[in-house]
Image (cartoon, rainbow, N blue to C red):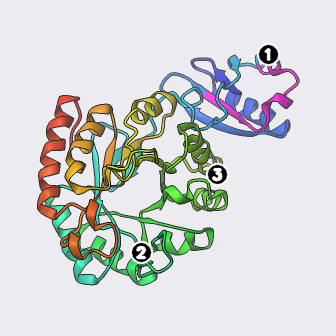
Amino acid sequence: MIIIMQVGASAAQISAVIARVKQLGFQAHLSEGEERSIIGVIGEDRKVEDPDQFTLMEGVERVMRVSHPYKLASREFHPQDTLVALNGTKVGGKQIVLIAGPCSVESRSQILEIAHAVKEAGATALRGGAFKPRTSPYSFQGLGEKGLELLAEARQQTGLPVVTEVMEPGLVPLVAKYADVLQIGARNMQNYALLHAAGASQHTVLLKRGMMSTMEELLMSAEYILSHGNNRVILCERGIRTFETYTRNTFDINAIPVLKARTHLPIIADPSHATGKWEYVHAASRAAIAAGADGLIVEVHNCPEQALSDGAQSLRPEKFAQLVQQVRRIAEAVDRTV
């Protein structure tokens, strides 16, 4: 349920409504727009016997039931786009963000070489895995904290903020110590303990859609993070599993405009995991930006044939530089910038 305040409602009137919401045993989340404020009533709002009681309070214009099971992520609650700060830019604003780097941090020389290359090409942030969830227990699992230290060194040298995956609740404080953005991968999208921990950390979170998850399930997972008062959430469409075998996943480009219509949270695309093959990454990237994505997260490796993970879908640095130029032209066509 949301309580829409009148234009010009005073701070005292807003505070009184929030106090009443809490008195009834609910959480109150205030969203302040340019003209009016909206108060979200979080909890099982069917337990509110008489929603009209709020309309009798001074400064209240009307009360609405939120039609979606996700509340805080809904545009009904927060009509304006949320802008997530990232190293001087805003994810969700006019500028397209480009997050690039290897699937896994493999060595100091590898991550530093790639970091400098993607920075020169125009990347906004550096991605790299220190802890890697792998299908096989015998595959490379990442360098752990040593990998985080190398990512921090790369940030120090290039100025690029770091995006890296966190795999379990107990690792959130450690990863947050080194990373600017906590990535929650597709396999962990519905790891609710991890979502709670990431939300409570008040760190920026990049939440990837599960490989067999609906858009509503993605938004419900985001709701866990938002419920902790952490609105620094970026969604990521990375392809879903279908019967098709010519690509690693099926890139659900529909999800970009659909999510844009239903949530205020920014959404980026992962063409590397969506296609699984580097030769298709450029085309999928161009399509994502044309469809309204707020950015891309792309895998880049200086020697893909020797990569310890995901080499087949990784661009060489020179190919990433070409991608940046292509994306820049598409962005201009849809009145955005890179």
The vertical placement of 310 against 16, above or below, is below
The reply, left or right, for residue 104 in relation to residue 317 is right
Q: Position of residue 236 (x, y in %)?
A: 43, 47
Q: Residue at x 27, y 55 (%)?
A: 277
Are the residues tagged 3 and 1 within 8 Å (C-beta)? no
- Which of marks 2 and 3 precedes in the sequence? 2
* Closest to the observer, 12 or 107: 107
Q: Residues within 10 Å of mark 3 (few under 14, many from 20)?
A: some
Which residue is disc 2 drawn over? Answer: 130
Q: Residue at x 62, y 73 (%)?
A: 170
Find the magenta span and give its range: 38-54
Q: Position of residue 15 (x, y in %)?
A: 71, 34
Q: Amino acid at mark 3?
A: His
* Closest to the observer, 212 or 105: 212
Q: Is residue 273 visible?
A: yes
Q: Is residue 11 visible?
A: no
Q: Position of residue 110 (x, y in %)?
A: 23, 78
Q: Quadrant of residue 218?
A: top right
Which residue is disc 3 drawn over? Answer: 228
What SS does tag 1 mark? Answer: loop
